Amino acid sequence: MRPGRELDTLIAKHIFGHDVVIKRKIPTEVTPAGERPLREYSKSTGAAFDVAEKMKISLIPIEGNQWFALCGPEEGFKSPADFMKFIGEGNFQNSGAAVAETAALAISLAGIKAIETRMNATESGDGSTTH
């Protein structure tokens, strides 16, 4: 998925639980604090770090000026050793993981992937929350 309005809308709805409406041709995020223009989560580092904080996403710069973002267990990692163990197991298919050209896009994609994985686990009756 590319950075932009579609991805930003998914993040606002599924990660933050906000409604998104169009007001005067402008996508508007309806939050508990009021309305605001839809944040550019997939393009703005500041907005993306709000996603990272909420979803407990770890971010690592990698070769080729790219970024690796990982959303592990819902409760986060207890220690760097737990993070390294998770990385060593390499089970990225069942977690929210993404590589992208920008930190904002990597965080956004990892967050959405984690939400999808958790929803699928719930629907399948797996009940597992450590994706």
Image (spheres, grey):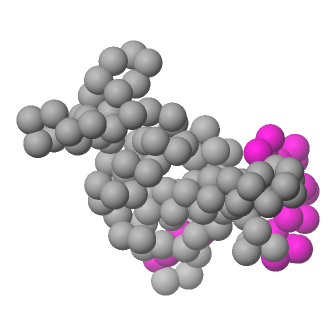
Q: Position of residue 10 (x, y in %)?
A: 44, 51
Q: How many marks?
A: 0
Q: Residue at x 27, y 28 (%)?
A: 36
Res 115 seen here: yes
Give the vertical position of 5 relative to 97 (above or below). above
Q: Where does the image place residue 93, in percent across and percent down from the top left?
A: 73, 74
Q: Is residue 83 visible?
A: no
Residue at 40% x, 24% y: name it: 31
Q: Percent from the top left, x then y, of residue 28?
A: 26, 35
Asked if residue 61 is among those painted magenta in the image, a careful observer would answer no
Residue for point 76% across, 68% down: 94
The outermost residue toward the left is 24
Foreground: 36 or 22?
22
Position of the C terminus, as image quadrant, is bottom right
On the rendered image, what quadrant is the N terminus found in? bottom left
Comparing 65 with 93, the one in front is 93
Residue 115 lies left or right of residue 2; in this view the side is right
Q: Is 91 above or below relative to 85? A: below
Q: Residue at x 36, y 70 (%)?
A: 2
Q: Quadrant of residue 81 in the image?
A: bottom right
Q: Nearer the viewer, residue 47 or 114?
A: 114
Give the residue furthest to the top. Answer: 33
Residue 103 percent location from the top left of the image: 47, 61
Residue 70 magenta-highlighted: yes
Find the magenta span and give its range. Answer: 65-90
Specify the quadrant of the image occupied by residue 18.
top left
- The image quarter containing residue 22 is top left
Left or right: residue 100 versus residue 62 is left
